[in-house]
């Protein structure tokens, strides 16, 4: 066990990937807390699927695989997708869940057409494009890791600088507008940060699973506290732990993919929180319920006894 | 003959999904459909590992069970106080992760490609045939989809009124004495069956497209459930056939082209629909403005 940890740290390539994934988990956990509180968790899923055509167009334009170009492509496609979702919900009777489903599958379908078209056209450099999309952290090169780390730090710093504003628009957008905050602008800023988190995460965990990096740590953190700063810290730590264990465990064997392990680590943390968290966890809820019942039974018994004694004295 | 089988499979996928999609849209459960279609993956992988073959019955049963498990888990999390979007997201990503992990760890035992999980390989359908007692009975996918479609038509035909009331007004359905929960799980069971039998042909994500997009297109065009189901199936079938022809011209993924065509039909409906379309809305608004 110890040897394994030491070997992880001594191999420079693995060390960078480990740090990249840890920071990514941290950044997405923090941003994900805000999207969780705004009940927009599944937006991450839409953004991730919508990134596919963006990445393909970026590749077709420049014919190179470069993480920064893909990031820009994914960002533009994600923003277009969010615009489409809000247009559909505003102008038709279709509800937001169906609108998200339509947009994510349509973008993904178009992306699939582009991807297969690129693959069949057979330009030599296209190999590995699908690796990028289905997430294999081990396939990242050093420059990718730098971008990943830069993006994650950016997310955390932005969340800290705009903490008060984001807090207000997460809990009470009406009040935020009332005191004169530029709510629309801030919502867009948060959306762009979410898109950046998703676009960066795709490479490590893949299109389908990247949404979990935003949702699961934040949902787990919610069980431990009622205070936003504490929740952000918990979510960041949970995300970082999942990212680190995903990257570490996937070095154990040839066929172990990073993404699923990361997501399962996050899910494990969520289940533990759901069961064991003090106050909101299921265990403490059950105990409290039982104590309350026992208290009530005892007091009811005492009441009945008193009443009986009172009756006999008369 | 190859073309015939591929188009027949695509049409069967489209009609099965389009019918169920109408109920999902009306019940505002579009994303539960998304979750189910991802979460059946571990069921498919486990059925592979246990039976060692691509035996359809095992797969259909195992994966349908996982679909229902997904719905159950999502509901349990929701009743324990977690908001619905987060519970959907947590459950389906966790189950999908289990599926991907099972497949990649047992890559030598499971004859299932991860690309195929996401995109589907409808082009291989004609080669994967089902033999019964030595005679070739035709592609396995066509049989599975055929059975699924029959079950759906049978159940919907028998209980159309009940499903309709549950879709529009669950509270009234309860008041009428309809076992709403039973019909809920029946619907979800049918969605799971559809997801499993369409899975290998169109992949996890495009199943969702076929479930939601044709139904949403029909939803824009009419206010009557019967008409909506008919239109939805028509949109699905048109997308399937046109998508196949376009994919041939572009040399690209068939499933991707089918969903893209469905999306384009949706955009057309969005703009041109007689009552709910953008043009009709703006014309109405201008008329009102002039009248004022």
Image (cartoon, coloured by chain):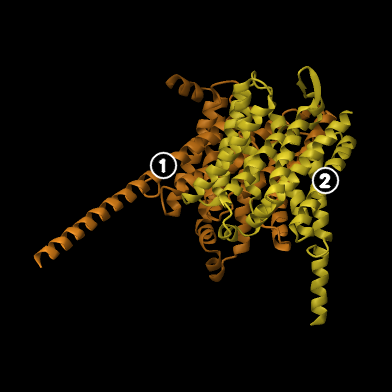
Horizontal arrangement in the rendering, residue A171 relative to residue A255 (left or right): left
Give the residue pinned by disc 2: B261
Horizontal arrangement in the rendering, residue A9 relative to residue A190 (left or right): left
The residue at the far left in this view is A313
Q: Which chain is orange?
A: A
Instruction: Give the crowd class for mark 1: few <14, some 14-19, many >=20 residues within 10 Å.
Output: some
Q: Residue at x 78, y 24 (%)?
A: B129
Q: Secondary structure at mark 2?
A: helix
Q: Secondary structure at mark 1?
A: helix
Please state the chain letter of the residue tagged with numbered disc 2 in the rendered image: B
Residue A114 vs residue B174, the one in the foreground: B174
Q: Is residue A208 visible?
A: no
Give the residue pinned by disc 1: A275
Horizontal arrangement in the rendering, residue A194 relative to residue A86 (left or right): left
Please state the chain letter of the residue tagged with numbered disc 1 in the rendered image: A
Which tint is chain B? yellow
Q: Position of residue A261 (x, y in %)?
A: 55, 31
Quadrant holding the N terminus of chain B: top right
Quadrant holding the C terminus of chain B: bottom right
Instruction: Give the crowd class for mark 2: few <14, some 14-19, many >=20 residues within 10 Å.
Output: many
């Amino acid at each position: 066990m110890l040897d394994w940890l030491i070997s992880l740290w001594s191999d420079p390539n693995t060390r960078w990937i480990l740090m990249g994934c840890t920071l990514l988990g941290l950044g997405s956990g923090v941003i994900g807390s805000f999207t969780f509180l705004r009940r927009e968790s599944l937006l991450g899923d839409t953004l991730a699927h919508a990134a596919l055509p963006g990445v393909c167009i970026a590749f077709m334009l420049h014919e190179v695989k470069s993480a920064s170009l893909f990031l820009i492509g994914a960002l533009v496609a994600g923003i277009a997708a969010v615009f489409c979702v809000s247009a559909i919900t505003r102008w038709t009777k279709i509800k937001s869940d169906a609108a998200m489903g339509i947009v994510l599958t349509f973008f993904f379908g178009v992306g699939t057409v582009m991807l297969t078209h690129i693959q069949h056209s057979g330009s030599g450099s296209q190999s590995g494009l699908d690796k990028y999309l289905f997430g294999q952290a081990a396939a990242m090169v050093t420059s990718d890791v730098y971008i990943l780390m830069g993006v994650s730090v950016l997310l955390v710093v932005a969340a800290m600088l705009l903490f008060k504003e984001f807090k207000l628009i997460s809990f009470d957008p009406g009040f935020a507008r009332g005191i004169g905050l530029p709510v629309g602008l801030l919502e867009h800023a948060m959306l762009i940060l979410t898109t950046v988190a998703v676009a960066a995460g795709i490479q490590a965990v893949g299109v389908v699973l990247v949404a979990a990096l935003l949702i699961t740590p934040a949902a787990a953190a919610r069980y431990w506290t009622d205070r936003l700063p504490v929740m952000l810290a918990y979510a960041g730590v949970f995300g970082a732990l999942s990212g680190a264990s995903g990257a570490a465990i996937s070095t154990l064997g040839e066929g172990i993919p990073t993404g699923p392990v990361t997501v399962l680590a996050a899910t494990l943390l969520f289940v533990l929180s759901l069961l064991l968290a003090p106050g909101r966890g299921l265990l403490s809820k059950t105990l409290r319920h039982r104590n309350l019942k026992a208290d009530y039974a005892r007091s009811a018994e005492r009441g009945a006894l008193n009443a009986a004694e009172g009756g006999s004295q008369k | 003959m190859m073309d015939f089988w591929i188009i027949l499979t695509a049409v069967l996928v489209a009609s099965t999904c389009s019918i169920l999609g109408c109920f999902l849209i009306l019940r505002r459960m579009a994303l539960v459909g998304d979750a189910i279609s991802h979460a059946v993956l571990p069921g498919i992988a486990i059925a592979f590992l246990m039976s060692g073959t691509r035996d359809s019955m095992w797969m259909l049963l195992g994966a349908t069970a996982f679909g229902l498990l997904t719905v159950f888990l999502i509901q349990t999390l929701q009743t324990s106080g977690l908001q619905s979007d987060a519970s959907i997201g947590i459950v389906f990503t966790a189950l999908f992760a289990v599926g991907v992990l099972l497949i990649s760890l047992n890559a030598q035992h499971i004859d299932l490609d991860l690309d195929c999980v996401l995109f589907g390989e409808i082009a291989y359908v004609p080669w994967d045939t089902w033999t019964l007692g030595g005679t070739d009975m035709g592609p396995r996918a066509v049989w599975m989809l055929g059975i699924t479609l029959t079950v759906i038509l049978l159940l919907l035909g028998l209980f159309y009124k009940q499903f309709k009331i549950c879709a529009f007004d669950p509270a009234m359905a309860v008041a009428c004495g309809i076992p709403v929960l039973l019909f809920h799980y029946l619907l979800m069971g049918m969605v799971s069956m559809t997801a499993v039998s369409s899975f290998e042909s169109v992949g996890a994500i495009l199943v969702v497209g076929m479930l939601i997009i044709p139904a949403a297109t029909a939803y824009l065009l009419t206010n009557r459930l019967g008409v909506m189901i008919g239109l939805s199936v028509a949109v699905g079938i048109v997308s399937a056939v046109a998508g196949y022809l376009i994919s041939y011209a572009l040399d690209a993924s068939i499933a991707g082209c089918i969903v893209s065509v469905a999306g384009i039909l949706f955009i057309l409906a969005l703009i041109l629909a007689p009552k709910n379309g953008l043009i009709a809305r703006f014309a109405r608004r201008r008329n009102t403005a002039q009248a004022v």
